[in-house]
Amino acid sequence: MATVHLLCGKTGSGKTTFARRLEQSGAMRFSVDEWMLRLFGPHMPRKEFDARVSICLELVLELSERLADLGVPVVIDAGFWRREDRLKVRARLDQKGVRTYLHYFDLSEEELWRRLERRNRDLPKGTFEITREMFELFSGWFEPPGPDEEYRRVED
């Protein structure tokens, strides 16, 4: 049974770069943002966005479970901003006998915004443009892992 790596952090914290490094080491990489952009485009109402993210994540989890059964390590680049979502995904994978590692990307707000400004100037394929207003809104939604959640802190 292989491992599923869950990446938790705010936008611009380095999750995708880290996921690509794991991919280069042999892991199957799933990026929910890439799926969302390819399937649905960049703009949609929030309620629709949330429903579509749930669909993409469900498909990613089904594929991850199968790949883990086959011994293929997986990295899920989905942010996992909410504690409830992290706990549900970990419980689901644990029930299937899949080992998970949570990687928490912890950077200052100033550094995150600096990175996003640079990224927005030359937006890479598979990423959403994040305005300052969006950044501030999203930052308020993020729930960092608590002391009862086993995780590895990444300060990259």
Image (spheres, helix red, strand yellow):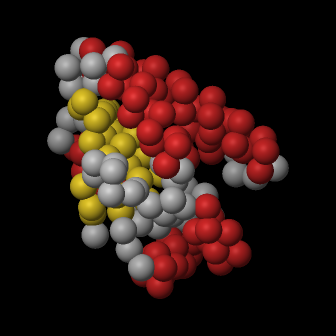
Q: Position of residue 152 (x, y in %)?
A: 24, 55
Residue sitting at 71 percent across and 36 percent down? Answer: 51
* Image quarter in which the N terminus is found: top left
Furthest residue in direction right, as rendered: 45
| Residue 97 vertical position relative to residue 73 in the rendered view, above or below | above
Furthest residue in direction front, as rendered: 148
| Residue 2 vertical position relative to residue 69 in the rendered view, above or below | below
* Image quarter in which the C terminus is found: bottom left
Residue sitting nearer the eye, 116 or 103:
103
| Residue 150 vertical position relative to residue 10 in the rendered view, above or below | above
Residue sitting at 33 percent across and 51 percent down? Answer: 148
| Residue 53 vertical position relative to residue 135 in the rendered view, above or below | above
Res 88 seen here: yes
- The image quarter containing residue 39 is top right
Q: Position of residue 44 (x, y in %)?
A: 79, 48
Res 44 seen here: no
Position of 55 with respect to 118 (left or right) is right
Residue sitting at 42 percent across and 25 percent down? Answer: 92
